[in-house]
Image (cartoon, helix red, strand yellow):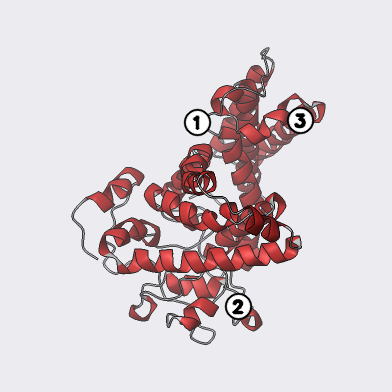
């Protein structure tokens, strides 16, 4: 296998390919907004700075690709990046009629690109320099499956959001809590933010616990636990039924109690990055935070393959709930020896994992 160390051209090649994917995604989204663009992002595509930013990304990709071609004998990364940049340039030169009022697209290509860029920039360097398992490569086993989960959930974000908001919208449409909602929304934003964290974590604790204790629900959640390696991508492995169910119940207090939009958006950003952090291959122990907030070691034990790791540590924000309801487990300074499900009953492959809950299965 060709070297992947600094100076081998691998880092520049991967960077070039990643930037070429970003450029291609945003250009396609800008030119076909009614098919590929997230509704909230469409107003950005007619800004002059957007064109300059996109051109800067393509130029950076091209330069990195050239460096990779010079340094690396295997030139597939550099060539692939240059081909994508060339195709993106062609599409970008085509005339387009921008319409920010176009109907909501089913596929959100721009959200996938932003999602991948945002989380990758944060967590790939963290895992590279502070990884708990230093011998676990970036492209570890099963990375293709988890990237596919990441891709599909990102592309379908608008559809998943619509389905997840249906229960909350129904409650709001058929209830009148004007005084209560006004009182909640009148609180300081920081207090609303904390309340949202507590309420959603309490609901998610019991939802999560139910998916472990009820056999037919466990079949869906087993897909998430089937990951045998933990890193920033592993948290993306979730069955679509569980995604819709989890988001539906956790957004109910946020959307129905009258919290301000800024508090809700701040929480959604936090929980997205925090969930990724909890699954990441990062060795931070932060033991002094252990009694107050959930840490990666806390959640890694939830994914552990050991017998003592079964049905423990359900909370996502506050271990208080696990302490109160008898599911807390945190051996001092220890990490699980492995991840997954004993016997590894969940098959490999996205489609087979989607079908797994509907087949005869055993825990």
Label 2 or label 1, whichever lies nearer to me, is 1
Specify which label sits upstream in the sequence, 3 or 1. Answer: 3
Label 3 or label 1, whichever lies nearer to me, is 1
How many angstroms separate mark 2 from mark 1 (CA)?
41 Å
Residue 4 is at least partly visible in this image: no
Circles 3 and 1, Cβ within 8 Å, touching? The answer is: no
Residue located at (66% from left, 44% from top): 12
How many angstroms separate mark 3 from mark 2 (CA)?
40 Å
How many angstroms separate mark 3 from mark 1 (CA)?
23 Å
Specify which label sits upstream in the sequence, 2 or 1. Answer: 1
The residue singled out by tag 3 in the image is 50
* Label 1: how many Cα within 10 Å (few below 14, some 14–19, many 20+): some
| Quadrant in which the C terminus appears | bottom left
Specify which label sits upstream in the sequence, 3 or 2. Answer: 3
- Most extreme residue toward the top, as rendered? 95
Residue located at (36% from left, 45% from top): 350
Q: Position of residue 224 (x, y in %)?
A: 40, 58
- Which label was assigned to residue 262? none
Above-or-below relation of 296 to 196: below
* Label 3: how many Cα within 10 Å (few below 14, some 14–19, many 20+): some
Circles 2 and 1, Cβ within 8 Å, touching? The answer is: no
Above-or-below relation of 329 to 57: below
Q: Position of residue 223 (x, y in %)?
A: 35, 56
Label 2: element kind = loop
Label 1: element kind = loop
The residue singled out by tag 1 in the image is 106
Q: Position of residue 302 (x, y in %)?
A: 44, 72
Q: Nearer the viewer, residue 85 or 204?
A: 204
The residue singled out by tag 2 in the image is 285
Residue located at (53% from left, 38% from top): 158
């Amino acid at each position: 296998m060709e070297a992947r160390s600094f100076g081998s051209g691998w880092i520049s090649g991967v960077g070039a390919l990643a930037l070429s994917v970003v450029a291609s995604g945003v250009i396609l989204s800008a030119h076909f907004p009614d098919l590929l663009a997230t509704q909230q992002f469409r107003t950005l595509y007619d800004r002059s700075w957007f064109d300059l930013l996109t051109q800067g990304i393509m130029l950076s990709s091209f330069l990195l690709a050239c460096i990779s071609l010079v340094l690396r004998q295997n030139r597939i990364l550099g060539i692939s990046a240059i081909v994508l940049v060339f195709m993106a340039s062609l599409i970008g030169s085509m005339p387009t009629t921008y319409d920010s009022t176009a109907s909501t697209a089913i596929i959100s290509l721009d959200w996938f690109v932003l999602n991948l860029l945002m989380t990758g920039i944060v967590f790939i360097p963290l895992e590279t320099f502070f990884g708990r398992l230093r011998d676990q490569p970036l492209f570890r086993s099963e990375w293709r499956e988890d990237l596919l989960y990441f891709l599909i959930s990102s592309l379908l974000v608008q559809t998943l959001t619509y389905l997840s908001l249906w229960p909350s919208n129904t409650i709001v449409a058929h209830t009148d809590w004007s005084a209560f909602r006004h009182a909640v929304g009148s609180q300081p934003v920081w207090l609303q933010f904390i309340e949202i964290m507590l309420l959603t974590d309490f609901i998610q604790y019991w939802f999560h616990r139910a998916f472990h204790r009820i056999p037919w629900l466990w079949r869906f959640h087993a897909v998430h636990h089937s990951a045998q390696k933990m890193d920033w991508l592993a948290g993306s492995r979730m069955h679509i039924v569980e995604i819709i169910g989890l988001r539906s119940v956790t957004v109910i207090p946020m959307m129905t109690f009258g919290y301000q939009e800024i508090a809700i958006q701040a929480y959604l950003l936090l929980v997205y990055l925090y969930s990724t952090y909890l699954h990441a291959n990062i060795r931070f122990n932060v033991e002094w935070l252990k009694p107050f907030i959930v840490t990666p070691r806390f959640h890694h034990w939830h994914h552990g393959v050991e017998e003592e790791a079964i049905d423990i540590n359900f909370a996502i924000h506050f271990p208080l709930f696990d302490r109160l309801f008898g599911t807390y487990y945190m051996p001092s300074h220890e990490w699980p020896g492995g991840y997954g499900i004993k016997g590894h009953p969940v098959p490999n492959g996205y489609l087979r994992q989607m079908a797994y809950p509907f087949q005869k299965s055993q825990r």
